[in-house]
Amino acid sequence: MSKKGYWMAMVDVRDPEVYKQYIEANAAAFAKYGAKFPMRAGRHANPEGPTGNRHVLVEFESYDRAIECYESPEYRAALKYRLAASTGHFVIVEGA
């Protein structure tokens, strides 16, 4: 059995209206690749300094599936909105 894959993002949204377009556009990729959201923009504390104003953890059935989703045409079409509307840190990680 393969380990789960995760997208972890700490994002500072500068343009909420364009970011809404990203959320709408990424739904197709997330549905296709079976994404789950253990954490999506809930309350947060920054005890060690700024981390952005939006934090997201996306879970996939495997690391390979997480990579496939990121590289998919569906997600690439959505990504342009996130990059236009925000800055931040993003990583794809294999679970324990």
Image (spheres, rainbow, N blue to C red):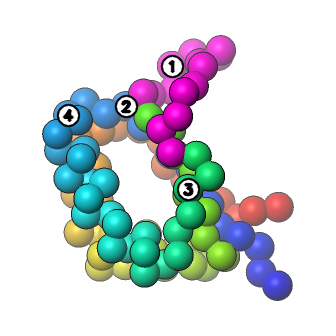
Q: Secondary structure at mark 4?
A: loop
Queried whether the magenta region covers residue 6, the answer comes back as no
Magenta span covers which residues? 40-53
Pointer 2 residue: 12
Looking at the rendered image, the disc whose residue lies closer to the viewer, 3 or 2, is: 3
Q: Identify the image quadrant of the N terminus.
A: bottom right
When the figure is inspected, residue 96 is found, relative to residue 62, above or below; the finding is above
- Which of 57 and 67 lies nearest the eye of the viewer? 57
Q: Are marks 4 and 1 in contact (CB under 8 Å)?
A: no
Q: Which mark is residue 71?
A: none
**SS label for mark 1:** loop
The disc, 3 or 1, on the residue closer to the chain's N-terminal end is 3
Q: Residues within 10 Å of mark 4 (few under 14, many from 20)?
A: few
The kind of residue on which mark 4 rests is Asp
- Residue 69 in the image: above or below residue 23: below
Q: In the rendered image, which residue does mark 1 sit on?
A: 50
Per the model, the C-alpha gap separating discs 2 and 4 is: 9 Å
Please rate how many residues cluster around mark 1, counting C-alpha atoms within 10 Å: few if below 14, some from 14 to 19, many from 20.
few
Q: Who's the residue at 43% across and 81% down the image?
A: 32
Where residue 90 sits: x, y (%)?
49, 49
Q: Point out the tag, 4 or 1, that comes first from the N-terminus.
A: 4
Give how far apart the Cα atoms at labels 4 and 1 are.
18 Å
* Most distant residue in the left direction: 17
Kindly identify which numbered label has been placed on residue 37.
3
What is the spatial separation of the Cα atoms under label 3 and label 2, in whole angstroms?
A: 19 Å
Q: Residues within 10 Å of mark 2 (few under 14, many from 20)?
A: some
Query: Where does residue 68 sit, x and y in percent of width and height?
Result: 48, 79
Residue topped by disc 4: 15
- Front residue of 73 and 26: 26
Give left or right: position of 29 versus 39: left
